[in-house]
């Protein structure tokens, strides 16, 4: 960070936002198709979205990253910065991001709308209620939950086995007290007591469905396909058996339209949907991405976590299902983070250490090699920090060069789009190169083989293991007819292995599968390797303690 | 209903809505102060609300009703119809209504946005997510809940007695399974198991506070004053002790601005806030009402349930606290409902029965006499149904005349504002008459006496009774310094007594108090006389079963 930059919130407050109808106007979205939420946020009508069918698509660019470390990588800022850089060099570009979850804002300080001079605005709104999408998703989820217990209350005609109800409840809040509950207590009028629990809203299968649905009809079909429980005979019961798909669709009919906002440089950004990147696929909505591709020549989007999880799911789940063909991939890293992968402690990051950088770069190299396996063009973006030395940068450049990939320093955090011009030009050049994109495995591959393929060819693992119970579940899901679904890996984001402490590029490890879950509406099989937390808690001193409106009516303490 | 009228949803769909900025324009609200939510809903900025301070107030008209019966009274349609009628005769009028709750829409068919040709639109939006206010209120409530259990988890420095936590959780859903739960199960990481439960969002004290707050500073103060629990030594613990008032205010900062929509006749309507009418005061927000009074010459608003609960709380809680002075009161009734109060079964309502009407009119007469005690001018509105006979109408007119009150037939359901012109003219005349409005009891009266005053002078009761435990609570709250608060009666809406089957105007009954609760943030004492349901359930065949989007993308089955 080469110059003094204010805090994210200070910069965001100084932003000269344009009326959203002007931003939309540049994309030729007529005012009647723009559904405003205030003056700086809007949804684009589904009628308009539909009208774009048949138009040519722009180029799709994925921003992904090395395995995250406490040093930070800046994937979202790079996505925003690259979008601004592309617009700056005259390329009509839209960025597509995930919506942040409200609950975590009250836990640990920090929003999810970029940072420095690479932000999307209005950032307070985006981080809080925004256009209400997550509230709608939570309500649709909880309506289904209420319908299940109501059905049992009135006689349980469908024969739910209360021990085998798969559908929990959700809330957009960090609330550990709700992780495991007993519900329906208090006597006859309140139903039959049973074990239950809440996940955070972003972990809902409704969220994953919302982000993978191609239109409203597809949304309804997928909602109906959710498996909510089983009978004593283990026969699945679907959401459509409770006629829940209709009212859930009604609750989601406004939310499903993509949200348009702008970057600090007044370039358009779609921010829509935000599924978990472990038990779901971690990308913004298909509807937002496909709409953006019709409206711009370049679309920059990001995926959750590092490339081992995020990019793999982007390719194998989102692109496969939505028929998307990414033109280029940007892998983001920082010298600091690579040093940590090379064994340097956080406190020592300020000192030059070329050897540690070289050692840690094995992590970057593995990601480059992995992403190549999907047949796409690659470039590396190095988020520049002021302590980075020329020798350290040179080491990374040489490594990338040896792998046939260019690496560019980026300074969007301090300079906005001006700080990513070189990267933007390189991306444009890459997009014109041949592209042989294909998912890693075919639909027809058996589920266990799919997991093994990912683990051995991407994670560097020797093998995949699992108890008989777990292995039997794979066959069960195949017998039920779900064998053609992609797998959705849920493992630690901090390592290629399942051990978060194994930095760099570990090899010959073993991936133990603890559990698998079927998301029949989202159409993937979640493969859980390790602990997965679907309802966070608040820390001892939550950031809520410092959040308030100041005398000017501005939000303080949120960022 | 003298002519063939389509269903509410058919009429609403045919509505020629004006852009909301045009509706706002007629009120001289500049576009920069209008925060649009789509093209037909908007919030009015708090900056604009503040700028109105010092401007003269219009006349405030309350629409209330006889005790409800299954025959229906049409209080909301009369509010809308009267607003349209006043505008029609050239009086600049705004109506103020409560926001409907989303959850119940999926239980029993029927929205809450008026009916026939007296509706507010867009009705599907108003009945579902609207502008997200209830989601914001629910989130603010549940953040406080999460902060409580988080505080206990990290050491319970404030010394909560887990058995004495007063703050439950909320959800805008009819979900009986959540009425009584055990939370924090599952081991060390999830906290200390304790009894808990959910109420529907509209029952939240945050909702009552939201509706009584005069501005954002007052909102924050009241949120901080919420008593969330007690220590083992029975010392109260406040929301401000957890620093929850700041982040809760941030979550409510957009919601607190009033929502502007329009009637079918394109007249302005504020729809804002919707507290329960039993454990809370059942009126739309003070901010919406006071804003409307600055913008129009006449403001028509309604209160929940019959006048015994709704009007009393409107006067004794809302008007007392907000310094409002109602100019006139409209008491709504129907011949059908009065017949039911006279002992006629629902199936027999089609037949002329003047004697039953006269007998049941005792209910109307009691309400008229009651409302007079507040020193306001009164008129009666009879919602005309086609089966009503001239003799029946005449009987009511004579009764009213004997009490010094005019009664007018209204036909807004079939004719819109044209059907209430006579009523509108009468209301205008009343507003110019002397007005000696005063609450029923002074702040200084002891709490028990306040209850007794209401019960004896309005309900016709002989006395109020309660166990020693309950009576002691009154003294406790007084000792804690809350004796000056008004009382908020929670009893059946169907009778002046606490027995829902005692129709007409029962006398000499006794009002048993089961429990009292302190709403220290809302600043009232809830006095519970009978069963109070704060989390509804779904029926055997919920209306959700029939709700869906049709091929045109319209909502079906909601109304």
Image (cartoon, coloured by chain):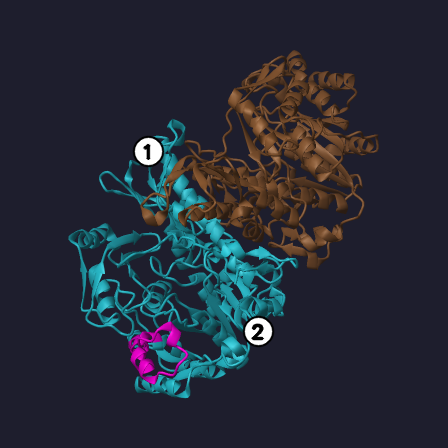
Chain colours: A brown, B cyan
Residue B258 x %, y %? 50, 60
Residue B168 x %, y %? 36, 45
Is residue A21 located in the magenta-colored stretch of the structure?
Answer: no
Residue identified by numbered label 2: B265
Residue B48 against residue B166 in the figure, above or below: below
Could you tell me which chain the residue with mark 2 belongs to? B
Q: Residue at x 28, y 53 (%)?
A: B517
Q: Residue at x 51, y 81 (%)?
A: B2
**Foreground mark, 2 or 1?**
2
Residue B417 against residue B159 in the figure, above or below: below
Residue B48 against residue B137 in the figure, above or below: below
First in sequence: mark 2 vs mark 1: 1
Compare residues B63 and B532 and report the one nearer the observer. Answer: B532
Residue identified by numbered label 1: B156
Task: Report the side of A438 relative to A360 (left or right).
Answer: right
- Residue A199 visible: yes
Say which quarter of the image contains residue B332: bottom left
Task: Report the side of B311 relative to B87 (left or right).
Answer: left
Task: Report the side of A151 relative to B503 (left or right).
Answer: right
Read off the magenta span. B340-369
């Amino acid at each position: 960070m080469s110059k003094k930059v204010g805090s994210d919130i200070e910069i965001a407050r100084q932003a000269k936002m344009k009326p959203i109808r002007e931003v939309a106007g540049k994309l030729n979205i007529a005012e009647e198709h723009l559904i405003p939420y205030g003056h700086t946020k809007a949804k684009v009508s589904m009628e308009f979205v539909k009208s774009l069918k048949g138009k040519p698509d722009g180029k799709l660019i994925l921003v992904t990253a090395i395995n995250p470390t406490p040093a930070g990588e800046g994937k979202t800022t790079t996505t925003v910065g690259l979008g601004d850089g592309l617009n700056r060099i005259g390329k009509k570009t839209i960025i597509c991001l995930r919506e942040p979850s409200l609950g975590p804002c009250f836990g640990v300080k920090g929003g999810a709308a970029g940072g420095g001079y690479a932000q999307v605005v209005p950032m307070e709104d985006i981080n809080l209620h925004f256009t209400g999408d997550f509230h709608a998703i939570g309500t649709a989820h909880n309506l289904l939950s209420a319908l299940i217990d109501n059905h049992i209350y009135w006689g349980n005609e469908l024969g739910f086995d209360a021990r085998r109800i798969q559908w929990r409840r959700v809330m957009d809040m960090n609330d550990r007290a709700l992780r495991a509950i007993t519900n329906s207590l208090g006597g006859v009028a309140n139903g039959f007591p049973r074990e239950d629990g809440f996940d955070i809203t972003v972990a809902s299968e409704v969220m994953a469905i919302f982000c993978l649905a191609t239109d409203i009809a597809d949304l309804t079909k997928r909602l109906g396909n959710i498996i909510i429980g089983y009978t004593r005979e283990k026969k699945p019961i679907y959401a459509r058996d409770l006629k829940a798909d209709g009212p859930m669709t009604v609750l989601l009919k406004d939310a499903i339209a993509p949200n348009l906002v702008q970057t600090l440089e007044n370039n358009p950004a779609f921010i829509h949907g935000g599924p978990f990147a472990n038990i779901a696929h971690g990308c913004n909505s298909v509807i937002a991405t496909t709409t953006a591709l019709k409206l711009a020549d370049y679309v920059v989007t990001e995926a959750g976590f590092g490339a081992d999880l995020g990019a793999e799911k982007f390719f194998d789940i989102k692109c496969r299902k939505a028929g998307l063909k990414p033109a280029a991939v940007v892998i983001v890293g920082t010298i600091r983070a690579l040093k940590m992968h090379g064994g340097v402690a956080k406190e020592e990051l300020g000192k030059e250490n070329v050897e540690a950088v070289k050692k840690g770069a094995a992590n970057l190299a593995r990601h480059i090699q992995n992403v190549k396996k999907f047949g796409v063009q690659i470039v590396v973006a190095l988020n520049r920090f002021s302590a980075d030395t020329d020798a350290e940068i040179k080491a990374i450049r040489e490594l990338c060069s040896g792998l046939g990939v260019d690496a560019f320093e980026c300074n969007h955090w301090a300079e906005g789009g001006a700080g990513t011009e070189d990267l933007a030009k390189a991306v444009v050049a890459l997009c014109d190169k041949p592209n042989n994109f294909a998912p890693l495995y075919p639909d027809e591959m058996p589920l266990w083989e799919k997991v093994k393929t990912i683990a051995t060819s991407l994670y560097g693992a020797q093998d995949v293991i699992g108890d008989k119970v777990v292995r039997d579940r794979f066959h069960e899901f195949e017998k039920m007819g779900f064998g053609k679904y992609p797998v959705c890996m849920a493992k630690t984001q901090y390592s290629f292995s399942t051990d978060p402490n194994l930095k760099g590029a570990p090899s010959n490890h073993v991936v133990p599968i603890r559990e698998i879950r079927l998301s029949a509406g989202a159409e993937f099989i979640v493969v859980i390797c390790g602990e997965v937390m679907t309802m966070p808690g608040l820390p001892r001193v939550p950031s809520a303690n410092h959040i308030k409106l100041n005398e000017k009516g501005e939000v303080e303490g949120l960022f």
